[in-house]
Image: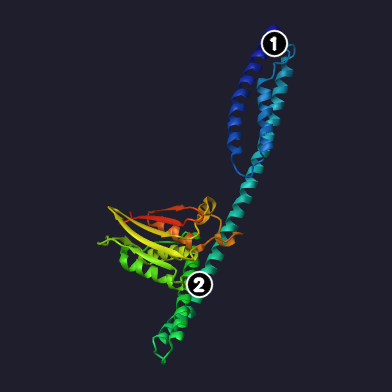
Amino acid sequence: MTNNHNAAFHQAKKNLLLMLVGGGIVAAVLLYWLLEPGYGIGTAVGVLLSLLIIAFSPTPSAHNPQQQIDQLQTSLTQRENELVQLQSELQQTQGQLKKVEETAVLDRTARNHFWRHISHELRTPLNGVINFSHMIGLGFYGDVTAKQTNYLSRIEQSGWFLLTMLNDLSDLAKIESDEFHLNLAPTDLQSVCEESLATLNSVITDDDVRLIRDYPDTWPLLTADERRLKQMLSNLLRNAARQIEEGYIALRVQPEAAWLQLVIEDTGEGMTPEQQTALFPAIGPDQPPLMLQEEKPNFGLAVAAKIIETHGGSIQIKSEKGRGTVLTIRIPTRPA
């Protein structure tokens, strides 16, 4: 009889050891699952605590070892059933999340396709407005007065401004769809700077604002996407012009070995730290769509920051409320 009791005790100890090892494994798996989104944390913690209680609870009386074994096996069976249920719930949650993700991707694709289509359709009439106002202003269709020439110039510049906005929206859709690419080639940096400054004509209408050009004696050789570079500079300069009533806007070109530094300085109203943080929102296929945000950011600035980033560069802000802003852009002269 004693031998039978000893054998039963040995078997119980073996079962308990197996339970400790198995409980540790199950606990590790559960802790991993706890990191998964949409998982029932309370349920998993309950199972984990139950396993630990079973593993470290005092050993029942040895007068009835078979009862001890039966209780342990019953508890283990219950926990295994709960674990199977948790696995089933997790698989269902993952399936639901996958469907939501697929729907979101389809919605984003459809929306971006719509914006690209609209931008394309609006470019044709806008180009007509720009070209005809320019030709009329030059006298192709008869003489015009100085006042009419001024109005026609404003129409032309406003047309360019709207066209730039359409390009920004189209590029924003490309960025959010991960379809934004650069066409790198030798770039005429001086032309880029002058044409970018020219876009301020439709924004600055007061003689109290001066434009300062701080250019090097020798222009550096630069490989970049010329159109994108011009778009980036124009967007940043126009944003500076909208914040200033008097003073100056300066564009400084500072070559530095293998890098080009462009500095845009203004004496406008400046920004708080909170405004600086929100100035260049992150955009991309893994970011929330900017067009659906409740507080609409400046699309042009978001695109400008992405152009700098795609060139392998960076942008820094130095500003203080009421004391103007300095933007420092650094891009490699030969992007990798």
Q: How far across and how far down the image is residue 216, in percent?
A: 28, 61
- Tell me if I can see residue 128 in this picture: no
Whole-angstrom CA distance, mark 1 to mark 2, is 86 Å
Q: Disc 2 designates what residue?
A: 119
Q: Toward which corner of the image does residue 226 lie, by quadrant?
A: bottom left
* Amino acid identity at mark 2: Ser
Q: Residues within 10 Å of mark 1 (few under 14, many from 20)?
A: some
User: From the viewer's perspective, is 227 left or right of 86?
Assistant: left
**Foreground pick, 4 / 124:** 124
Near-viewer residue (124 or 308): 308
Residue 100 image position (x, y, % from top left): 61, 54
Please state the horizontal and vertical placement of residue 82, each as a whole percent of the image.
Answer: 69, 35
Q: Quadrant of the C terminus?
A: bottom left
Name the secondary structure under disc 1: helix
Closer to the N terminus: mark 1 or mark 2? Answer: 1
| Closest to the observer, 221 or 270 | 270
- Residue 213 visible somewhere in the drawing: yes
Left or right: residue 125 compared with residue 107: left
Foreground tag (1 vs 2): 2
Q: Which residue is mark 1?
A: 5
Q: Residue at x 39, y 64 (%)?
A: 228
Residue 84 coordinates in the image, percent (x, y): 66, 37
Amino acid marked by disc 1: His
Tell me the quarter of the image containing the N terminus: top right
**Residue 297's disc number:** none
Residue in view at x 50 percent, y 63 percent: 243
Mark 2 residue element: helix
Mark 2: few/some/many CA within 10 Å (<14, 14-19, 20+): some
Q: Is residue 238 left or right of residue 222?
A: right
The residue furthest top is 2
Eyeballing the image, is 234 above or below 15?
below
Classify 317 as above or below 147: above
